[in-house]
Amino acid sequence: MTKPTILVTGGAGFIGSQVCKTLAAAGFLPVAYDNLSNGYAWAVRWGPLERGDLRDGAGLRDVLRRHRPAAVMHFAALIEVGESVRDPARFYDTNVAGSLSLLEAMRAEGVDDLIFSSTAAVYGMPAHTPVVETLPLRPINPYGVTKMVIESMLADYAAAYGLRFGTLRYFNAAGGDPEADIGEAHDPESHLIPLVLDVALGVRPEIAIFGDDYPTPDGTCVRDYIHVCDLARAHLLALRRLLDGGESLTVNLGNGAGHSVREVIETARRVTGHPVPARLAPPRPGDPPVLVADCARAVADLGWRQERAALDVIVADAWRWRQRWRASPPVDAR
Ligand code: UDP
């Protein structure tokens, strides 16, 4: 029997490539659709790469016709919050217009099932923590707005055209492939854990702590770091649910446990055995003091549980990849 195909937009990126690996291990053929603006050809190892842009509707339709996927997983997006503030037009174009183009191509080709990569940024500065899915969506930057708009598009397409979706709102995606085949390689990097590991490696001189006067136990911001492998398994469960005829759903994906910036730095010192010089810097505008997920819905509706939840494991897996990547960056076919 031939393997069912899944089209993975953004399949050359950090989370998309890990999901491709997980899909392949579960008996699917992942076809990555990526323009390589932020992803890497070397990260596409478990199925073919179709190089293309989301906004190219004709190209997308051609790919859907040729591969006849059972479902689409949609990761392709611009994700850097600061950039979204400086250049919102690009974000609306790539994220919103790109997703509309994808939905239209799916509708034209009769593909009804979509797993969508959303974000805790849709909640903005939530009034309650841990964050439940029923809180109002009040994003505070264009990036979060684009993801909220796409979520609305999915609901409207579901009501009008029979789309079925699984929207997964990630908190802080982190960690790395335990076999260090793939991992985070953003350029420029803005996320805490890879930056801290670069300091441990001596690639950067120090880590800036963005504020230590927040109403948290040690004064630094608390975030919910979720291992990319746990994320990937949740995607597989959400996919199976849709393919088995289950209802559309929207769930948070996090560890359910918060860790402060200082805790992350301490953990990196312990795990790597290297010093990590840190200095205090001004708070970053728009950073909520605490952002932690309530994951009860994902547990109940998907039967999902985190398997690599410990911060030590998350940092150790990210560290193994980061050392390898810095020592010999894979050559891209770009
Ligand atoms: N952070 C920091 N220094 C850095 C990068 C991030 O103190 O160089 C803090 C940031 O303020 C936030 C946490 O680390 O509280 C996680 O930031 P990241 O950018 O990784 O993810 P975000 O929570 O913004 O999605």
Image: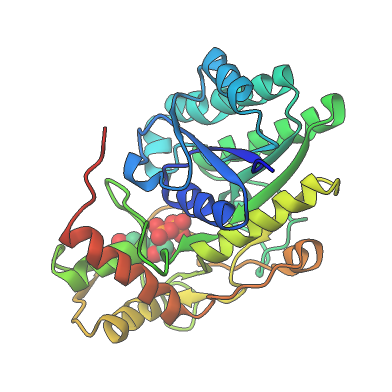
Q: Is residue 213 visible?
A: no
Decide: is 156 above or below 321.
Answer: above
Residue 176 % position (x, y): 41, 64
The vertical placement of 273 against 206, above or below, is below
In the rendered image, the residue lying farthest to the front is 1
Horizontally, is 273 left or right of 210 in the view? left
Q: Residue 164: x percent and y percent?
A: 79, 38
Q: Quadrant of ligand 1?
A: bottom left
Residue 16: image x %, image y %? 49, 47
Q: What residue lies at 16% left-to-right and 63% top-to-bottom?
A: 204
Q: Quadrant of residue 221?
A: bottom left
* Residue 6 vertical placement versus 23 (above, below): above
- Does residue 2 appear in this view? yes
Along the line of sight, which residue is nearer the eye, 58 or 260?
Answer: 58
Residue placed most toward the observer, 181 or 278 = 181
* Quadrant of image for the N terminus: top right
Residue at image position (45%, 43%) is 79
Q: Nearer the viewer, residue 67 or 301?
A: 67
Residue at image location 38% in from the left, 72% down from the top: 317
